Amino acid sequence: MCELLIRVVDKFPPTGDPRRDAGRSVRGDVIAAVPDGHPWSTRERENPGWVIVRVPGMTEAEGWSFQAGEPGGRSVRARGRPDKYPHTRLFMLDLDALPPLTAGVVLDPNSVRAARLTKPPLAVRG
């Protein structure tokens, strides 16, 4: 089993600048994936911007796969397109497709997998 630290509100409002917005964590981003029983800090447990959930049947490696960045990192434009910027985290969870997230909630791994979304590319401002 793994535990996931999930952002439940955007850290900052979008700026409209894709270079800046691509690196910001947003609602649904998996911030950390750790083995069951991880000693979370007080800051991690009490921050209203995220929640810790348990996912039996999901490995830590699978949890970490939600944090994969888009190829090219932050300094190179993504997907071979000159008008797009890469995300720091390419995947996110559709929180509206999951049960309400409260501290310590246990989620079915299949529902977490089904809620996985790929973020759309960010266009460069004209």
Image (cartoon, rainbow, N blue to C red):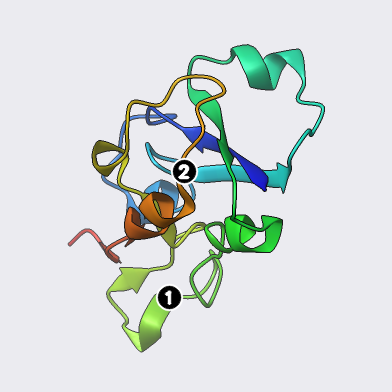
Q: Identify the mark at residue 58; answer none if there is no mark.
A: none
The residue lying furthest to the bottom in this view is 80
Residue bearing mark 2: 24
Please state the total of marks drawn on the protein image.
2
- What residue is rendered at 49% in x and 50% in y? 23
Give, as a three-letter code, the residue at label 1.
Arg
Q: Position of residue 36 (x, y in %)?
A: 74, 40
Q: Quadrant of the C terminus?
A: bottom left
> Which mark is first along the chain, 2 or 1?
2
CA neighbours of label 1 inside 10 A, class few (<14), some (14 to 19), many (20+): some
Query: What is the distance, in whole Å, between disc 1 and disc 2 at their CAs?
Result: 16 Å
Pinpoint residue 97: horizontal percent, then vertical percent.
25, 43
Q: 24 left or right of 17?
A: right
Kind of element beneath mark 2 = loop
Q: Identify whether 14 is placed above or below 88.
A: above
Of 57 and 89, nearer the camera is 57
Return the mark for residue 77: 1
Given residues 35 and 106, the one toward you in this image is: 106
Left or right, 6 with reference to 123: right
Q: Where on the picture, by quarter, is residue 99?
A: top left
Front residue (pair 5, 86):
5
